[in-house]
Image: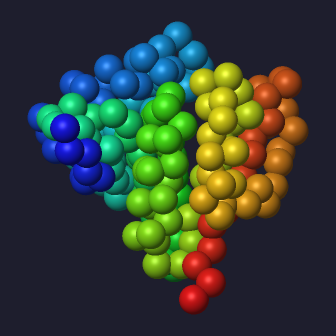
Amino acid sequence: MQASVRALRGSDIPAARALIANQFGGTPYEARILEHLEVARHGNDAECVGLVEGDEPRGLVLSGSVAGAHDIVKIHAVVARDLAVCQILAAAMRDAAPRMVVYEVPDDAPFLGHAAAMTALGYREEGRVADFVRDGVDLIVMVWRRTT
């Protein structure tokens, strides 16, 4: 079966919701990620791109612009328990970015391995805010910058 990275279509939304529920169901992150999916679905400055195999999304990335910033993309969420899928999606964001990509990722179980996967693609941890998400959960700021 052939896999490709593409914008998700309306028909992909139920499968995207299922991916989110599978990875983030019952966590404090689920509602916010579903909110970003709805924003992407209605085209209000957020995009939803997924790795699709056949007709079934295997992962998705929700992103948007950064208010007041030029040519910077912010990843709101990467939904992919499979780190290879996480890397494919993060690479697609990097390759499409005009200047810089920022991913603020909680240092928490549902995101286990995301920071390492991003580092392998050239993203760097440029900041960490202790106890930002909640007590005991830091926020890691991962950044990729175009150098050419």
Residue at (46%, 78%) from the top-left corner? 98
Residue 136 or 147: which is nearer the viewer? 147
Question: Residue 53, position in %: x, y?
Answer: 23, 38
- The answer to whether residue 134 shows anywhere in this view is yes
Q: In this view, does 11 lie above or below 45?
A: above
Rendered-image quadrant of the C terminus: bottom right
Q: How is the image coloured?
A: rainbow
Name the residue at the front extreme: 1
Q: Is residue 33 above or below residue 74?
A: above
Which quadrant: the N terminus? top left
Q: Is residue 53 left or right of residue 75?
A: left
123 left or right, relative to 54: right
Q: Residue furthest top?
A: 26
Q: Which residue is located at x 66 percent, y 30 percent?
A: 112
The vertical placement of 35 against 104, above or below, is above
- Across and down, in percent, residue 11 comes to 12, 34
Q: Which residue is drawn at 32% across and 20% down?
A: 18
Q: Is residue 67 visible?
A: no
| Position in image of residue 64 (x %, y %) | 43, 58
Could you tell me residue 58's position as x and y percent? 33, 33
At 22% from the left edge and 25% from the top edge, which residue is drawn?
14
Give the residue furthest to the bottom: 148
